[in-house]
Amino acid sequence: MIDFYALTSPNVQKIFIMLEECGLPYNTKLVDVWKGEQFTPEFTRINPLQKIPAIVDSDGPAGTPYTVIESGAILLYLAEKTGKFIPHDPIKRYDVIQWLMVQMANVGPMSGQLIHFSRFAPPPQDYGTARYRSQVNKLFDLYDQRLANQPYVVGNDYTIADIAAFPWLRNVQTLAMKIDSRPNLKAWIDRITAREAVKRAFAKIGAIQSARDTATDDAKDRFFARGKYALT
Ligand SMILES: N[C@@H](CCC(=O)N[C@@H](CS)C(=O)NCC(=O)O)C(=O)O
């Protein structure tokens, strides 16, 4: 059985999708980061970085419990555990790993910063918002171009490179990105949205209550490690 430490954010959505796609049984253990639950000693023992997602697999590679942090590493771990959504062919496998890294090092961080500066930064927000909007526009164009001649990020097969990118790139409203001028990306979002496992994942995510919408200014400062919570 897999214990899945989760809430609702895009990096967590990747793992809900992967677990549903693989048909693996799991217990969802909510860590409400807006209440500071990532900082408890119990959760810090699971992830010293104090972030979700994380999993603890009671049936790890050595037959003993194994903990995995970082959404990209969790996707790779689950793909290797099940033999699903990662090709065996070494070249195709490294293609998938490269595009998983493109997502982890670029799409996630740049989109996260765009949301932070456009929604949560004190005014004036112009410089940060403009910088990260430009970076995210570049990434949206990259995926749109890549998907012009193939249905999925690494060719004809749906892989963890798609599962990693989808929760961020589907987020066009929150990111205020143009999608009609990116028809290949739009078709890919529609293609993945229509998958039964993805529908099941979002039904579960939609039912989760978090303290995000009621977070106080102090809770936001703690979450963003700023103000009296800034590490100097
Ligand atoms: N690179 C990490 C990023 C995880 C991440 O940023 N998680 C957020 C989700 S909201 C979090 O736990 N933030 C809590 C904090 O930073 O205190 C991954 O892909 O798993």
Image: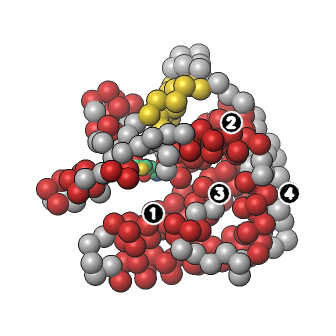
Amino acid under disc 1: Gly
Q: Is residue 23 above or below residue 148?
A: above
Amino acid under disc 3: Phe
Q: Is residue 99 visible?
A: yes
Query: What residue is disc 1 on?
Result: 112
Location of residue 24 (image quadrant): top right
The tag earlier along the polypeptide, 2 or 3, is 2
- Measure the alpha-carbon separation of dots 1 and 3: 14 Å
Q: Quadrant of the C terminus?
A: bottom left
Q: Tag 4's secondary structure?
A: loop
Residue 225: where, in percent of width, then height? 25, 55
Question: Which mark lies nearer to you, 2 or 4?
Answer: 2
Query: What residue is disc 2 on?
Result: 20
Amino acid under disc 2: Glu
Q: Quadrant of the N terminus?
A: top right
Q: Which mark is residue 166?
A: 3
Amino acid under disc 4: Asn
Residue 83: where, in percent of width, then height? 75, 34
Front residue of this view, candidates 103 and 34: 34
Q: Tag 1's secondary structure?
A: helix
Front residue of this view, candidates 67 and 174: 174
Query: What residue is disc 4 on?
Result: 156
Q: Is residue 51 visible?
A: no
- Mark 4 neighbour class, 10 Å CA radius: few under 14, some 14 to 19, many 20 or more: few
Left or right: residue 16 versus residue 38 is right
Q: Is residue 18 above or below residue 9?
A: above
Location of residue 27 (image quadrant): top right
Left or right: residue 204 versus residue 230 is right
- Mark 3 neighbour class, 10 Å CA radius: few under 14, some 14 to 19, many 20 or more: many
Q: Tag 3's secondary structure?
A: helix
**Disc 4 and disc 3 in contact, CB within 8 angstroms:** no
- Measure the alpha-carbon separation of dots 1 and 4: 29 Å
